[in-house]
Amino acid sequence: MSESLATTESTVAAADSQNQATHQGENLEDYVTFKVEGQLFGIPVLRVQDILKPDRIAPVPLAPREVKGSINLRGRIVTVIDVRIRLGLEPRDDIDESMGVTVEQDNDLYTLLVDKIGDVIGLSRDCYEKNPGTLDPLWREFSNGVFRLDEELMVVLDIDRLLDLNSKT
């Protein structure tokens, strides 16, 4: 069984800069953030079902390389997807340090295995930009766009395309 982590008390260090806020408001969208290979990613908070630290990941024979296995989450079987592999990166050596973001797609649950969980942040649509031409072509396939924050770029992942295991990797 996976241990759920409380995510109700997230704070944002620079909430006032770059039109960021920690609450829903006019023209703001909330994102759950996480890091993979040092890069900040975000997905809409309404897509997130749970944040957890997966344990006892059962391997799935003959599964695609990015399918790490499956876990039992409160009686439901959840497919674990290694986001690093999906994004064309090398798998993490120490999988025990990975965290999971559970999302639902087509009535199935998937846990996205990431390096580190960040905060829930509200961002103004005014700061949203299309994918830059310099973004890795594979990452562009899985990205809806980016937000330029004070010190880094947040790539907004398209969960539907990321979970479409028939698309190229």
Image (cartoon, rainbow, N blue to C red):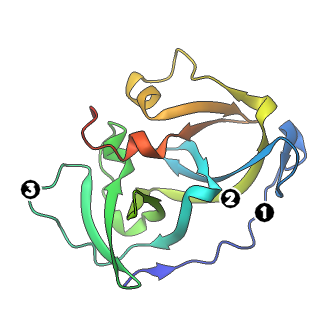
Dot 1: element: loop
Q: Is residue 56 above or below residue 118?
A: below
Residue 140 percent coordinates (x, y): 46, 26
Q: Which residue is mark 3?
A: 62
Q: Residues within 10 Å of mark 3 (few under 14, many from 20)?
A: few
Question: Do residues under tags 2 and 1 come within 8 Å of each other at their CB atoms?
Answer: yes
| Left or right of residue 83: residue 103 | right
Give, as a three-letter code, the residue at label 1: Thr
Circle nearer the viewer, 3 or 2: 3
Circle nearer the viewer, 3 or 1: 3
Q: Residues within 10 Å of mark 1 (few under 14, many from 20)?
A: some
Q: Is residue 117 visible?
A: yes
Q: Residue at x 9, y 56 (%)?
A: 62
- How far apart are the two marked residues, 3 and 1, measured between alpha carbons? 41 Å
Q: Nearer the viewer, residue 70 or 136?
A: 70
Q: Which residue is mark 2?
A: 119
Residue 9 percent coordinates (x, y): 75, 72
Q: Which residue is mark 1?
A: 11
Q: Is residue 150 visible?
A: no
Give, as a three-letter code, the residue at label 2: Asp
Dot 3: element: loop
Q: Residue furthest left?
A: 62
For the N terminus, the quadrant is bottom left
Q: Residues within 10 Å of mark 2 (few under 14, many from 20)?
A: some
Quadrant in which residue 22 is drawn = bottom right
Q: Is residue 39 above or below residue 65?
A: above
- How far apart are the two marked residues, 3 and 2, measured between alpha carbons? 35 Å
